[in-house]
Image (spheres, grey):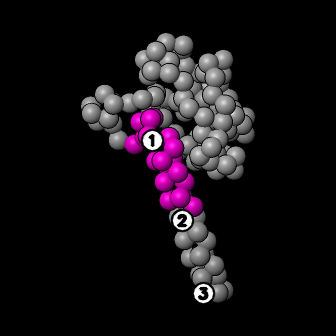
């Protein structure tokens, strides 16, 4: 029985690994170009264009403890960022030189949703 299931398990694991790699690439392209994602270094901190991702996710989780609500907020914010939706103090705009640009021309709603779930679970 286990020998019969092994190919299915291996394909499932490979597919899941590929999905995570694809999501990580999208996050690197979209999020990490401004937010600090990954290992901290003095140089990376000095060159940040937005709050670090761990800080963003801490704010999101505090404001939206239910994952589905957090995902909805994140997708909406990434598509239509505004000062009224910000979870950080208004001085954050001054610190980083402006509002986050909309991501709706870069990613579909489904991609934003997948990225949001990944970030919530990772951080």
Which residue is outermost to the left?
A: 42
Direction from residue 30 to residue 105 in the image, left or right: right
Direction from residue 88 to residue 38 in the image, left or right: left
| Range of magenta residues | 19-38
Which residue is label 1 attached to? 32
Which residue is label 2 attached to? 18
| Discs 1/3, front | 1
Query: Quick one: label 1, few (<14), some, or many (20+) residues within 10 Å?
Result: some
**Residue positioned 38% across, 30% down in the render:** 48
Which residue is label 3 attached to? 3
| Discs 1/2, front | 1
Marks 3 and 2, Cα distance to the nearest angstrom? Answer: 23 Å
Where is residue 76 drawn, in percent x and y? 69, 34
Query: Quick one: label 3, few (<14), some, or many (20+) residues within 10 Å?
Result: few
**Regarding mark 1 in the picture, which secondary structure is present there?**
loop
Above or below 80: residue 90: above
**Residue positioned 54% across, 13% down in the render:** 90
Marks 1 and 2, Cα distance to the nearest angstrom? Answer: 19 Å
Above or below 21: residue 89: above
């Amino acid at each position: 029985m286990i020998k019969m299931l092994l190919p299915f398990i291996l394909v499932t694991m490979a597919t899941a690994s590929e999905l995570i790699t694809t999501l990580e690439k999208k996050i690197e392209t979209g999020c990490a170009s401004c937010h600090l994602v990954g290992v901290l270094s003095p140089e990376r901190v000095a060159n940040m264009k937005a709050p670090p991702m761990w800080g963003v996710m801490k704010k999101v989780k505090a404001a939206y403890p239910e994952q589905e609500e957090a995902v909805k907020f994140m997708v909406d914010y990434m598509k239509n960022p505004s000062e009224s939706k910000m979870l950080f103090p208004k001085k954050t705009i001054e610190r980083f030189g402006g509002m986050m640009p909309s991501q709706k021309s870069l990613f579909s709603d489904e991609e934003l949703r997948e990225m949001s779930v990944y970030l919530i679970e990772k951080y």
